[in-house]
Amino acid sequence: MNFIFAFILFALLTVNAAPFQLSKRAITFGSCGDAHEPIPLLNVKIGTNPPESEKSESFEVSGKVTKVDIPDQATINIVYFDNDRKNLGNYFKTFNETIKAGTPFKISLSDVPTPRLPHSYELKVYVDDESTLACANAIVG
């Protein structure tokens, strides 16, 4: 009888000790455009996926813009929105050289500040020069 009780107690403790990962699912980015005006999709890798609230993060952004050059004054932008589309925080960096149309590019960004994040939010990463040239979007939560 004591053996059965000990076994059940051990099983319960083992289950409760297992890490619970359902609330920390990795972010998957998708496109930002619609079917009528497709925008080239960026590939985004995040150092800590999903980002941790109020901690610096690293991003690796790559892609290819096929129709136009990316001028050296264009920016790479990382923006967090809440469910009401209120801007929670943003970061940008200016390109330091022109990238010809059709040329693949990769940019590594470190020490990107992460705002205080609610349970659900939107994360948008895009290349901008008066209009959006390439983009990736993710809904979290």
Image (tube, helix red, strand yellow):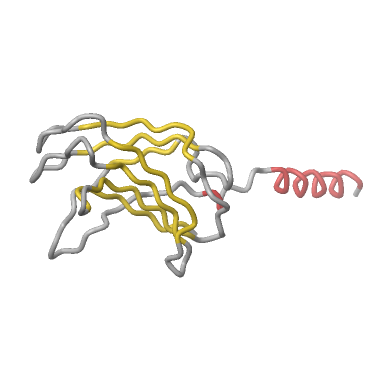
Report the front residue among 121 and 12.
Answer: 121
Q: Where is residue 24 in the image (x, y as percent from the top left)?
A: 54, 49
Report the front residue among 126 and 20.
Answer: 126
Image quarter of residue 52:
top right
**Residue for point 9% across, 38% down:** 101
**Residue for point 13% across, 32% down:** 103
Q: Position of residue 96 (x, y in %)?
A: 25, 30
Q: Position of residue 18 (x, y in %)?
A: 67, 43
Q: Which residue lies furthest to the right in this view?
A: 2
All told, the count of numbered labels is 0
Task: Judge left or right: residue 104 versus residue 1.
Answer: left
Q: Which residue lies furthest to the bottom in this view?
A: 84
Report the front residue among 105 and 88.
Answer: 88
Report the front residue among 13 and 66.
Answer: 66
Quick check: 115 above or below 46?
Answer: below
Task: Judge left or right: residue 55 versus residue 87.
Answer: right
Q: Where is residue 67 in the image (x, y as percent from the top left)?
A: 8, 46
**Residue for point 77% across, 46% down:** 13
**Residue for point 14% across, 61% down:** 37
Quick check: 16 above or below 34?
Answer: above
Q: Which residue lies furthest to the front in this view?
A: 73
Task: Judge left or right: residue 87 versus residue 75.
Answer: right
